[in-house]
Image (cartoon, helix red, strand yellow):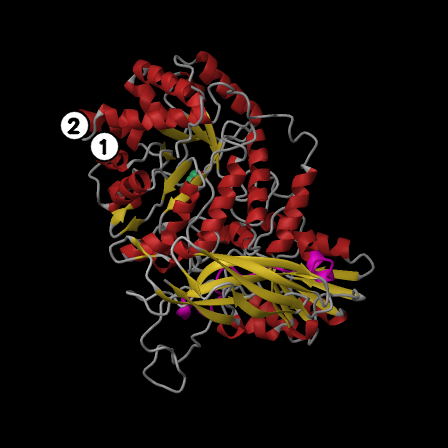
Amino acid sequence: MSPTTGSSAEGSEQRIDGLLAAMTLEEKLGQLTLRTADLVSGPKASEVGTDDIRTGRVGSLLHLRDAGRALEIQRIAVEASRLAIPVLFTGDVLHGERTVFPIPLGEAAAFDPDLWRRTARAAAVEAAADGIALTFAPMLDVSRDPRWGRIAECAGEDHWLTARFAAAKVAGFQGKGLADRQSIAATAKHLAGYGLAMAGRDYATVEVSDRTFHEVYLAPFAAAVAAGTACLMPAFTDQAAVPMHGNARILRDVVRDTWGFEGVIVSDYGGIDELVQHGVAEDLAHAAAIALQAGIDIDLMGEAYPKGLPEALARGLVAEADVDRSVRRVLALKAALGLFDDPYGRGDPAFFSRGPIPAHRKLALEAAQKSIVLVTNRDAVLPLDPAPATLAVIGPLADAAPEMLGPWAMYAAPDHAVSLLTGIEAAFAGTRIRHEPGCSIEGGDETAIAAAVAAAREADRVILCLGEALSMSGEANSRGNPVLPGHQAALARAVIDTGKPVVVVLSCGRPILEPWLFEAVDAVLVTWFLGSEAGHAVADVLTGSVNPSGRLPVTWPVALGQVPIFMGRLPTGRPARTSEHYTAKYQDLPVDPLFAFGHGLSYSRFEPSNLQVESRTIAPGETLQITVDVTNHGPRAGETTLLLFSRDPVASISRPLLELRGIGKATLEPGEKTTLAFELVADDLAFIGPDLQPRLEPGAIDLFVGPSAEANRLLGTRIELR
Ligand code: BGC
């Protein structure tokens, strides 16, 4: 699992030994220091000068926005610094670099690991052209809380899906191997449990059992490590009162010792310094010692390593050998990335000189199309085929190109995305289109609603573009009440009152809790933040030239009172029954969500049938084939996704009501039928016991296949695990 592999490993070891022997303490600490350059993504900025590079005081840089400057700085490091150690340029390439793909929560809705890999590959090619050699992605925090702004950055609520996302993204970023000029090192973040920040408030404390932490929250990181991620980043939060930036039990004992991870662990932004605020370190020296002992190699934007470690060494809290261990890992990563042998290999100032990369724009369109989820479609109001004579495109998100990019699109030109209005105008060329924003995304007043209502009255169909601003999602952007902001609900009600058919296009970084809206309008497309090609992708779905296939990677609650609500919950001794008082229900809310995990409609009508297992028993070490037929009874060709779930009905501990085990996809013509096959690996049925060890217990296993986690749409059968 070391980033240094193959025959070059020996030479690289020798080089590292030589460097370590020659380095001063200041130079060693420089290798453990990462500073932000042009952009700032945390509470403080830094002032890095070329002198810091020449003297070796800073070994890695974040957010440098110009390949030309990156090359200049690299030249100083390689040609003018004492030991000629190259700089590691890093960036947050969450969902694209210059070409922006859908936010991760949106892309997760495609349930398509190959797509996830391909978008990461394209992002890596662009990032490498910008000089970047390492990204702080993929983000693998499982989240079940729409209040948390960072739910937009993750693959949703399920750890099995997130583990697939992890493997695909690592493969995409790291490509043919780290040394390849078009590869960038992946950083699986934020390990772990950050998505549990209490009450959805970013950075807040976490309360979770050890067992669940291991089974659910660590699992995607184990998958990233198995896929060869070069780096990991701990979470700002704690587990069992131990902040992750000082959590040796997890970072050292589990990640390094049990998983065998030999790559670099890089702190989050000032995360080591924050051990003082967490109340587990007296000062920066103490914080630095705790983090270093836990196995964190690089201090991102903190003072702890550059300033605290010398003091920690003087006090005897750490030994120089501890520092050397981390320096060795950083140098090994730089070597594996080819930085010593080919320091100017990444960074191509001419790469974007002819504008956007056509193949990447095409991929952005495909990814955006596949991420759209049609959640309601009454009386088949969609697709708008034939095109209506007049269309009213209403709402503050209609003509809002920069918003389409979503959070963490830091390196893209903000206005390069295709707005919804532009996409719709291009797709409905013969239609008379009138646009009225109606109100602002947030703030403002209700005066413009009247003009929007007038436009709706004149139209055959209304496309109502509602949702959030991109600044409402992402880091430090939690919302205590994730509803439509500003006057949008009032706008929607006024437009609905016209009685015209209304299709809502919902741009959002999380489930938006407005259950009435889904009832009141004719169709809703959940479009997240779709990136560069947002407008074209949405227009394609509206016209029907693309048949929607996205599925919700997160359960959509009716109201905040249901949160956390998710597919993998454990059974209760008193399951909800409306007719019985003493059961697990609410007086004032349903227990079921508005939309289940996996929900998503199509213009086709797919029907699964004939669930078969190749054998009724399965033993450890075996794989079982499960097949199901699926027929397209609808009038259009389309892609269907079927999900395989399992349930362990009796085990030594309660097991979840449903566990996701597989994804099956088929594209079918009208009337066509096919058979989808899933493979179930017996050993994957193991679960984490109270002793935190995996156990595979014999007994019955229920298997289900269906389009979503909605119980009444599942086909089921039972097998026996021997
Ligand atoms: C975020 C990380 C990010 C880092 C660098 C932090 O504040 O939590 O996800 O990678 O900043 O931008």
Q: Is residue 254 magenta?
A: no
Identify which residue, 452 or 650, lies in the foreground: 650
Q: Main secondary structure of the magenta part?
A: loop
Q: Residue at x 38, y 17 (%)?
A: 15
Q: Is residue 560 magenta?
A: yes
Looking at the image, in which quadrant does ligand 1 appear?
top left
Identify which residue, 384 or 249, lies in the foreground: 249
Q: Which residues are magenta?
A: 539-566
Q: Secondary structure at mark 1?
A: helix
Task: Answer whether labels 1 and 2 touch (C-beta < 8 Å).
Answer: yes
Q: Position of residue 196 (x, y in %)?
A: 36, 56
The first of marks 1 and 2 along the sequence is 1
Find the distance from the CA under tag 1 to the CA under tag 2: 9 Å
The yes-or-no answer for disc 1 within 8 Å of ligand 1 is: no
Could you say which disc has been placed on residue 423 in the image?
none
What residue type is disc 2 on? Arg
Residue at the farthest left position: 315
In the displayed structure, does residue 165 sit left or right of residue 260? Answer: right
Q: Secondary structure at mark 2?
A: loop
Q: Which residue is mark 2?
A: 315
Q: Residue at x 44, y 22 (%)?
A: 7
| Residue 195 visible in the current orientation | yes
What residue type is disc 1 on? Ala
Of the 4 image quadrants, the one containing the N terminus is top left
Residue at the farthest right position: 430
Q: Which residue is mark 1?
A: 285
| Residue 97 visible in the current orientation | no
Q: Position of residue 392 (x, y in %)?
A: 72, 64
